[in-house]
Image (spheres, rainbow, N blue to C red):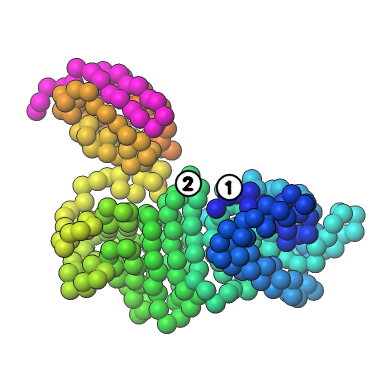
């Protein structure tokens, strides 16, 4: 959804939208019933927050300053805390008689980070609807579920779950990639993707679910991994194993995990230990979302050792070039490697 619309919605709710913004909002609302529902949901949340007990919450908030700050908020999504009450001070200018976390709701709108997530974990009112957390950032975000399980959500990934999660069930859906650290409970933790179902009690694992395949790699505990529409087609994984299901196949392939960088996106570290160049390339393509072309097959005989914290593509390519005596070109998201290569082992 266009960020400009979120800004217009915010101004509309604050009563500060001009004629052009109201005309743009009207045009957007007429495009689909879904847009009308979004406005109604946001208005309901905004109105409900105005009925809070303001005797317990009286923070001094400059409306313009706070709204502008939220537009630049990019690094505070890992943790959402309740704001502390402040004393009233008439010398500070505008004072709003409701809690500062309302503006975090506004920030959620601007950043597209899943409105229900903020409402659920700041003690605010919730709607009787599915909770959705969508990570539209270029970095991972951390999500704390009601059962205290932790999820690290990769960029352009999304989870959704019902508002009664953790009470009678622990079921959610995933699109994209996430790392799960699940709290132990007698209630099974179930993750649905388009094609697969993962069931656990307490464990840690990485799950990737995209259009062509779903891949699960287990770190701790045990999991049952099955086809969503055929539960009997199931494998049980132990730590160090991975399972892959490809769309259109009735097989689930289980094997030992040999990818040292399967959670590099979460840990922000790339590690290579005498690693063949084709595996290095796969890791780089996955981490940086690029495409690497090799112009000499002899290059695949080369091995590389290195460790990169907070990986930077330019630096890694420079190190590869110096270590393996290769040349590279980088244009947009495409990398080309050339060189004499290495002798076969």
Q: Nearer the viewer, residue 125 or 229?
A: 229
User: Relative to 47, is 261 on the left or the right?
Assistant: left
The residue range painted magenta reads 322-345
Tell me the distance, in whole angstroms, between the alpha carbons under discs 1 and 2: 9 Å
Toward which corner of the image does residue 242 lie, by quadrant?
A: bottom left
Q: Which mark, by number, is residue 139?
A: 2
Label 1 Cα crowd, 10 Å radius (few <14 / some 14-19 / many 20+): few
Relative to residue 206, is residue 198 depicted above or below? below
- In the rendered image, residue 50, in percent from the top left (x then y), is placed at 74, 71
Is label 2 in a helix, a strand or a loop?
Answer: loop
x then y, percent, for residue 259: 24, 46
Q: Residue 54, image x and y in percent?
A: 78, 72
Check contact, mark 1 vs mark 2: CB within 8 A.
Answer: yes
The secondary structure type at the circle numbered 1 is loop
Q: Residue furthest right?
A: 91
Confirm whether the magenta stretch covers residue 334.
yes
Circle 1 residue:
74
Residue at horizontal 28%, vertical 63%? 195
Q: Is residue 286 magenta?
A: no
Q: Return the disc, 1 or 2, that comes first in the chain's sequence.
A: 1
Assign the C terminus to one quadrant of the image.
Answer: top left
């Amino acid at each position: 959804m266009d960020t400009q619309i979120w800004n217009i919605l915010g101004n509309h709710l604050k009563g500060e939208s001009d004629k052009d913004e109201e005309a743009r909002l009207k045009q957007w609302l007429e495009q689909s019933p879904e847009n009308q529902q979004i406005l109604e949901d946001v208005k309901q949340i905004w109105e409900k927050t105005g009925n809070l007990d303001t005797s317990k919450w009286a923070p001094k908030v400059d409306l313009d300053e706070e709204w502008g700050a939220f537009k630049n908020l990019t690094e505070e999504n890992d943790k959402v805390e309740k704001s502390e009450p402040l004393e009233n001070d008439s010398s500070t200018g505008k004072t709003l008689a409701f809690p500062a976390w309302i503006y975090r709701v506004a920030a959620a709108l601007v950043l597209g980070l899943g409105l229900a997530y903020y409402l659920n974990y700041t003690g605010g009112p919730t709607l009787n609807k599915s909770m959705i957390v969508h990570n539209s950032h270029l970095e991972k975000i951390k999500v704390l579920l009601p059962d205290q399980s932790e999820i690290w959500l990769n960029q352009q990934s999304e989870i959704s779950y019902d508002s009664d999660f953790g009470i009678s069930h622990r079921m959610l859906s995933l699109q994209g990639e996430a790392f799960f650290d699940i709290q132990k409970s007698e209630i099974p933790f179930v993750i649905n993707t388009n094609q697969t179902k993962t069931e656990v009690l307490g464990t840690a694992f990485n799950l990737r679910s995209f259009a062509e395949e779903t891949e699960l790699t287990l770190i701790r505990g045990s999991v049952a991994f099955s086809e969503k529409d055929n539960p009997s087609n199931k494998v049980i994984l132990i730590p160090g194993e991975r399972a892959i299901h490809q769309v259109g196949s009735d097989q689930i392939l289980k094997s030992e995990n040999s990818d040292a960088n399967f959670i590099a996106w979460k840990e922000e570290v790339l590690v290579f230990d005498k690693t063949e160049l084709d595996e290095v390339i796969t890791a780089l393509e996955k981490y940086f979302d690029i495409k690497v072309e090799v112009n000499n097959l002899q290059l695949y005989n080369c091995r590389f050792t290195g460790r990169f914290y907070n990986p930077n593509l330019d630096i890694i390519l420079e190190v590869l070039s110096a270590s393996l005596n290769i040349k590279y070109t980088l244009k947009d998201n495409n990398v080309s490697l050339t060189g004499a290569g290495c002798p076969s082992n």
